[in-house]
Image (tube, helix red, strand yellow):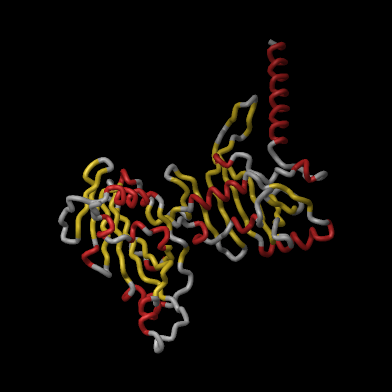
Amino acid sequence: MKKNVIWLIVAGVLIMASLAMVLYKNNVFSLDGDPQEFSGVFAVKDTNNITKIFVADMQGAHVLLKRTPQGWTLNDTLTASSHYIESVMGKLCNITVREPVPRTAVVNISKRIAAGGTKVEIYQMLPKFTLFGHPFFVKERLSKVYYFGPETQDNMGNYALLEGMDEPYIVNVPGFRGYISAQFSPYAEDWESHAVFSTKITRIESVVFTDFDNRNESFAVKKAGTRFFELYNIDNNRLEQYDTTKLLDMLAEFRNLNFETFVEQMSPESKDSILNNNLFRIITLIDINGEKTELRLYRLPQDDGIDPDENSAIITEYQFSRDRCYGVLNGNTAKMCYLQFYHFERQLQPLSYFKYQPQ
């Protein structure tokens, strides 16, 4: 009996010693010494298990990003830009300590970070501890807290503090030209997805193109089978012949169509004028689940410096931008955006473009 108790005590001591070593290795207790020895301590080794990212500045602006089975969400209600998220993940796993802050500047830099820095919290699915290669008590945990301060004078690094450290360091991402803090904006519009349409051709039920410049060039496309569609004119008459390649190429592009950027500043008077007078196209897509996406396109006025008194014909022809236009998605006029004609070239073609042209 005594022998069993002794063996249990020895086993318990060995387990506790192992746990202490594991916990010691998994935490940052001291970063004294050569920066090269801990250059990767800022990096998130496995970004695949990141579940949340919280970003906030000292003025109260903040965003919360969450990973869901459908993708990343922004502030629980919006869709986050997958491109932006991928870019941030690439930075997180490669953040490196470039060099320590000079001793004479530590106090000043620390004050600047505290007064105007950006806080970034990283949450991951992590175990309480790992023993002999097996994780125990895995759950969502706060893994790292960064405080990003000002960029360095060469704009190639950031002063940053990792929670648990005694002092800040200069960090960067090798091969990345720029500073990291710019990637962690506390403003929702910088993270919000720019997707307009993201429907694969196999999931399109119908698309209606309404042309306000020429009513007869309006048309509709309706699903008639797997990757087979029928083309209808404005009077809902089906066209017997059409250019299949052109139509399918156009429909295939609906899988990935994005706007350029949000319209940041516009007076209420200017917005009302645009919405009431400049509408020239509406694209309405319905997918196989009945979900509707409507994009309204409005011409973008531009000033080419032409005197209308000298050449009224030119000012009439070129009073609108030939490269961009305004867009309103699903009736949300509070978030008007800019779209480039280049990316929507096929979606802006008239009905006559798709009609069969005999050789």
Q: Residue furthest bottom?
A: 309
Locate residue 29: give its quadrant: top right
Q: Is residue 344 left or right of residue 148?
A: left
Q: Is residue 297 left or right of residue 187?
A: left
Q: Residue at x 39, y 81 (%)?
A: 315
Percent coordinates x, y for residue 236 in the rendering: 16, 57
Locate residue 143: give its quadrant: top right
Percent coordinates x, y for residue 148 in the rendering: 67, 56
Percent coordinates x, y for residue 54 in the rendering: 56, 53
Q: Residue at x 33, y 61 (%)?
A: 348
Q: Residue at x 49, y 48 (%)?
A: 66
Asked if 338 appears above or below 128 in the picture, the reply is below
Along the viewing direction, whichever of 198 and 219 lies nearer the viewer: 219
Percent coordinates x, y for residue 127 in the rendering: 59, 34
Q: Residue furthest right?
A: 104
Q: Residue at x 84, y 60 (%)?
A: 104
Asked if 211 appears above or below 46 in the picture, the reply is below
Along the viewing direction, whichever of 286 and 304 lies nearer the viewer: 304
Quarter of the N terminus within the rendering: top right
Q: Is residue 50 left or right of residue 272?
A: right
